[in-house]
Image: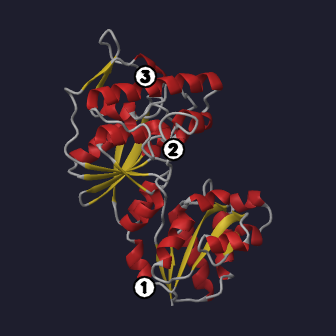
Amino acid sequence: MSVLVAPDKFKGSLSAARVADHVITGLRRTKPGLRCTALPLADGGDGTVDAAVAAGFRLERRTVPGPAGEPVDAAFAVRGDTAIVELAQASGLTLAEPAPLHASTDGTGMLIREAAELGCRRIVLGVGGSATTDGGSGIARALGIRLLDGSGHDLAPGGAALRFLDRLDFSGYALPDVEVVLASDVDNPLLGPSGASAVFGPQKGACPEQLTILEDGLARWARIVESELGVSAVDSPGAGAAGGAGFGAIALLGASVEPGIGYLIELLGFDALAREASLVITGEGSLDAQTLRGKVPVGVATAAAKHGVPVIAVAGRCTLGPEDLRAAGLRTAYPLTDVEPDERRCILEAGKLLESLAERIPL
């Protein structure tokens, strides 16, 4: 028997790689010598670079501006001519205190530029977990595009300043010819009640008044970009991802949009490993209604079904019933709360409990 262990992280407890390691340790306690392969996964948000490195990509570290402009240590992953850039590494919500009007994606743009300068010609941009609502204008600035007001002065970073945008100066644009892929499971447009500001702004600390400011800035940004380039991407699925960074990538970099987990599963080599497996074990911290909206476990189950391989899940907790699990392609789920009812201990002692849980999985 061969088991492929392909989980997402347990947020706040364990990285995807550590989840896989603990599951394998538990499985081998009851079945020594069991053939196990670990393939940590992510859906484009935080943990995507770590998952790529675990799959054989090389880690590249850089110091870049964080969402509030302060230096942060960030990384991207490289294999051959492909780079995976995780927006959360440079422009993530966990990197600074909320600053919804001024947070920018400049650091993410610098990572894209660094990857291109290494010779990467395909750049996969994972856009989950952003602190920003700047429409990707920071990415543009980092790549040499100047954002100018009516007096010819450079705009300040952030979404609020976009209200004063008058024109773009492309004379310093420096990105080589690259293919950019936006890995995102968000299909929101840039503007309106389903757009970047209205839906995601509150998560980044924006109050109602600030949401209006950000919406106005994004609308002006979109008008100027369309006027300068003749490209309309406001309503493109994914334009609203990461505070409109999706729009910037689509309109300015010609990015294509791919479902995050489906694309990354393919890129990281899941299919070849699944063909050799008798069982796939996936998982994430909480199996709940959000899981059903295209998170890692559902993506794994969908990919494994092509090979006829059964899939089960481990989790910190599970609020899905048997019918929901089956509809998602999962045969069953094993939550940590089965071995420890105290959810606080499940978070603090996740590794040890995960090993105990894995011992209970029948093989």
Amino acid type indicated by mark 3: Leu
Specify which label sits upstream in the sequence, 1 or 2.
Answer: 2
Check disc 1 and report its element: helix, strand or loop.
loop
Residue 15, horizontal then vertical, whole percent: 54, 60
Q: Is residue 61 left or right of residue 102?
A: left
> Does residue 118 appear in the picture of this structure?
yes
**Compared to 336, does 44 lie above or below?**
above
**Residue at mark 1 to residue at mark 3: CA–CA distance:** 52 Å
Residue 242, horizontal then vertical, whole percent: 48, 41
Q: Nearer the viewer, residue 169 or 251?
A: 251
Specify which label sits upstream in the sequence, 2 or 3.
Answer: 3
Residue at the disc numbered 2 = 188
Which mark, by number, is residue 162? 3
Residue at the disc numbered 1 = 276
Q: Residues within 10 Å of mark 1 (few under 14, many from 20)?
A: some
Amino acid type indicated by mark 1: Glu
